[in-house]
Image: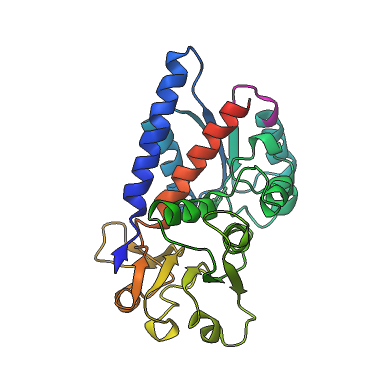
Amino acid sequence: MQLLDGKFISNKIKEEIREEVEALKKNGERPPHLAAILVGNDGASLTYVGSKVRSCEQIGFDSTLIKLDEDISEDKLIANINKLNNDSDIDGFIVQLPLPKHIDEEKILKLVDPSKDVDGFHPYNFGKMAQNLDSFIPATPHGIVELIKRYDIQTEGKHVVVIGRSNIVGRPISILLSNKSNPGNSTVTLVHSRTKDISFYTKTADILVVALGIPNFLKSDMIKKDVVVIDVGITRVEDLTKEKGYKIVGDVDFESVKLKSSFITPVPGGVGPMTIAMLLKNTLKARKNQ
Ligand code: GUN
């Protein structure tokens, strides 16, 4: 078993971006500028957005964090989005999800200017990705593809089973790995909460992407030997032995599954840091496109 070390690879990618930013600055150009809108005080979202802002600082990007009250009206949120759309100093921005229940997420994501949509959530970018055209690819599936590429894992002709059909992870990664590309050219099965007998499919997988948000869901009796396992789960589970009072748990029962797998991502330190690195990569792309 070999670990797919997302922390190590993401640091490498961040270093590559930092060097590009330095070159931009030497050329007299301004660095990329990422903005994030955070609505409310969800603990996990605060942590993720905090990491995104810190990473910007590490690599020489400018960053702006816009914190809005949990009970903000949809109109006021839209006003903030329009302001960022029209601000030529902002190259890209994200609206951290989930949004409070009174706000229509689908409507909000459609209002982000596609040229600044570094999350790749706008239907315009999602459609281009699905047609294998150049676009902003959502950061988590993009990070998974990059991890597969950097570890030289072969995907052509392989059976990939994706568990979970979210717009952020399951759906896009199933499209990317079936695209005519490298990595890609896989045969993909997408299973979800209404699939009868998920194990039937997972047992035939060469590569498994587990993104359903149920801690320790994938057990060793659900997989064949030498499978590649990508764990996208990041659930906070109470653990009073930790300073913060919780630990982060993946969707894979790591201790048993690692014994049967050829490659496996740890949680934390697998897909999570790759997500941030790819968001930064998308922001650099947005800056260059301007
Ligand atoms: N919530 C969970 N993952 C993401 C992400 O990649 N981007 C945004 N904006 N919100 C998220």
> Above or below — where is 8 with respect to 282?
below
Q: Is residue 88 magenta?
A: yes
Q: Is residue 137 left or right of residue 18?
A: right
Quadrant location of the C terminus in the rendered image: top right
Residue 220 location, x and y as percent? 38, 82
Hey, which residue is sitting farthest left in the picture?
241
Q: Quadrant of residue 16?
A: top left
Between residues 9 and 78, which one lies in front from this camera angle? 9
User: Which residue is depicted at the point 61% across and 62% down?
Assistant: 178
Extent of the magenta region: 85-91
Q: Quadrant of residue 55?
A: top left
Between residues 90 and 155, which one lies in front from this camera angle? 155
Residue 238 location, x and y as percent? 36, 68
Q: Is residue 228 left or right of residue 36?
A: left
> Above or below — where is 248 with respect to 97?
below
Q: Is residue 140 magenta?
A: no
Residue 163 location, x and y as percent? 55, 72
